[in-house]
Image (spheres, rainbow, N blue to C red):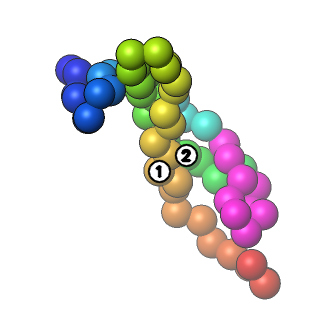
Amino acid sequence: MDFEFEDFVIREVGHEDRKMQTSKKVNNVSTDVTIFKVKGFDLSFDLLYCRGGKWRCLGSC
């Protein structure tokens, strides 16, 4: 399914499960990543939508 926003066409092209690091330096957080391809007239790039799993901080985060 394609979405249009201003002069861009956005298409979902993939989905991955990744291990990532949070901004507070917590490592190996399970993360669902949806990958979109964005295309304009003379510009094309990938856009990642990331949703992290629940994690527990022990000590100071």
Residue 56, given in percent of the width and then of the height, sits at 63, 72
Residue 8 vertical position relative to residue 26 in the rendered view, above or below: above
Label 2 sits on residue: 31
Q: Amino acid at mark 1?
A: Arg
Q: In the rendered structure, are the residues bearing label 1 and label 2 in contact, judged by CB atoms less than 8 Å apart?
A: yes
**Closer to the camera in the image, 53 or 34:** 34
Label 1, residues with CA under 10 Å away: few <14, some 14-19, many ≥20: few
Residue lying at 64% horizontally and 53% vertically, measured from the top left: 29
Label 1 sits on residue: 51
Residue 34, given in percent of the width and then of the height, sits at 44, 34
Considering the numbered disc 1 on the image, is that residue within a helix, a strand or a loop? Answer: strand
Q: Amino acid at mark 2?
A: Thr
Residue lying at 52% horizontally and 54% vertically, measured from the top left: 52
Residue 34 vertical position relative to residue 43 in the rendered view, above or below: below
Q: Quadrant of residue 17?
A: top right
Residue 5 vertical position relative to residue 54 in the rendered view, above or below: above
Of the numbered discs 1 and 2, the one sitting upstream in the chain is 2
Query: Which range is magenta?
Result: 19-27
Q: Quadrant of the C terminus?
A: bottom right
**Closer to the camera in the image, 31 or 43:** 43
**Separation of marks 1 and 2 at Cα, in angstroms:** 5 Å
Label 2, residues with CA under 10 Å away: few <14, some 14-19, many ≥20: some
Residue 11, given in percent of the width and then of the height, sits at 32, 22
